[in-house]
Amino acid sequence: MNIRKATIEDVPAIMELVRELAVYEKAPEEVTNTEEKMRKEGFGENPAFECILAEKDGTVVGMSLYYYRYSTWKGRRLYLEDLIVTEKARGTGLGKILLDKTIEIAKEEGCSGMMWQVLDWNTPAIEFYKKYNARLDGEWINCHLDF
């Protein structure tokens, strides 16, 4: 297993993982991002995100995509947008490797902690995060504006 930073050449593989996740989450039609936008927004002049990839035998089988946010209460935080492992690679410990590496990055960057979301029906992911003693908030409501 090889864990490495994503490059602009990895965008097709990243988008394939995103599409696989959208199917798993029963919302494939919700993916409106494009490879072109991802190249510009993640690997251009002012990157909006960072990404680490997991490769097995030269094939991308997982990723952690994250960015930094600022909390007036806590300071700099890492926001984990997506932790994705292909269906074929689930159950191999790859999710743990990716999450551990993301935690390591957050600590190296001086973050006070990490945040992410998980769907309330995604029991395997919830049980996985509980192993890290993650606090699962039930009192916050997600708000969205789409443009």
Image (cartoon, grey):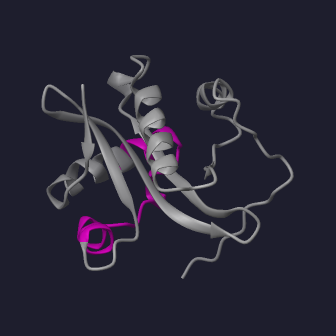
Report the predominant secondary structure element of the magenta stretch. helix
Q: Which residue: 42% across, 37% down? A: 101
In screen coordinates, is 15 left or right of 106?
left
Corner quadrant of residue 20: top left
Q: Which residue: 41% across, 28% down? A: 97
Looking at the rendering, the stretch of residues picked out in magenta corresponds to 19-43
In screen coordinates, is 67 left or right of 117?
left
Percent across and percent down for residue 108 are 45, 49
Front residue of this view, candidates 61 and 32: 61
Q: Which residue: 26% across, 80% down? A: 45
In screen coordinates, is 52 left or right of 36?
right
Is residue 21 shown in magenta?
A: yes
Furthest residue toward top: 92
Q: Is residue 99 above or below residue 47?
A: above
Q: Give the quadrant of the C terminus.
A: bottom right
Front residue of this view, candidates 131 and 109: 109
Percent across and percent down for residue 122 are 63, 33
Is residue 102 shown in magenta?
A: no
Percent across and percent down for residue 48 are 40, 70
Front residue of this view, candidates 40 and 75: 75
Q: Give the quadrant of the N terminus.
A: top left
Q: Is residue 32 above or below residue 24?
A: below
Furthest residue toward right: 139
Q: Is residue 59 above or below residue 114?
A: above
Front residue of this view, candidates 41 and 17: 41
Corner quadrant of residue 53: top left
Q: Which residue: 35% across, 52% down? A: 51
Percent across and percent down for residue 105 are 44, 47
